[in-house]
Amino acid sequence: MSAWIWLIGGGFALGACILAMHFVGMLVMDHAMNMRFDPFLTGFSMPIALDSPLFALWLISAEKLRLRRLLPGVLVMRPGISAMHYTGMAALQFASLIVWNNAWIALS
């Protein structure tokens, strides 16, 4: 039971830090225009940010960490952070136009 509490707490803490770092970074952008966040998309990015670290930590949790357990954790964590980032960016609403380059998004 204690291991599960640490796993859930660690996943939540890591996800909350990733989410906070991302949105604080977006809030400090200084543009000469009004910006706001779409509440639905912002809310949708939160479970992505909280769930991907939890799942990645669960994948790598073992008595002895081996590459065959670490690699799936990385393969979950990286797209999770990217999905949270691009969902958060899509939540930005302002007078300018965001141009998405799907090739760069796929590579990220």
Image (cartoon, rainbow, N blue to C red):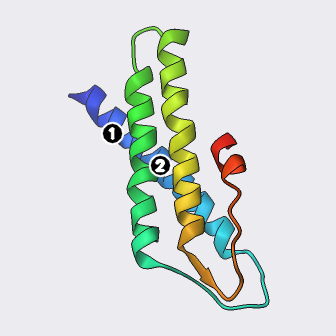
Question: In screen coordinates, is 48 left or right of 67?
Answer: left
Closer-to-camera residue (40/61): 40
Confirm or deny contact between disc 2 and disc 1 (CB under 8 A).
no
Question: In screen coordinates, is 100 left or right of 48?
Answer: right
x then y, percent, for residue 73: 49, 26
Q: CA distance from mark 2 to mark 1?
A: 10 Å
Neighbours of disc 2 within 10 Å: few (<14), some (14-19), many (20+): many
Q: Is residue 95 above or below residue 90?
A: below
Closer-to-camera residue (2/11): 11
Given the image, on which type of amino acid does mark 1 rest?
Ile
Q: Which residue is mark 1?
A: 8
Q: Residue at x 48, y 22 (%)?
A: 72
Q: Is residue 57 above or below residue 43?
A: above
Q: Quadrant of the C terminus?
A: top right
x then y, percent, for residue 59: 40, 24
Q: Residue at x 47, y 54 (%)?
A: 16
User: Is disc 2 placed on a helix, strand or loop?
Assistant: helix
Residue 92 appears in which quarter of the rendering? bottom right
Given the image, on which type of amino acid does mark 2 rest?
Gly
User: Is disc 1 placed on a helix, strand or loop?
Assistant: helix
Q: Residue at x 52, y 61 (%)?
A: 87
Q: Quadrant of the N terminus?
A: top left
x then y, percent, for residue 38: 48, 79
Q: Which residue is mark 2?
A: 15
Q: Residue at x 79, y 90 (%)?
A: 32
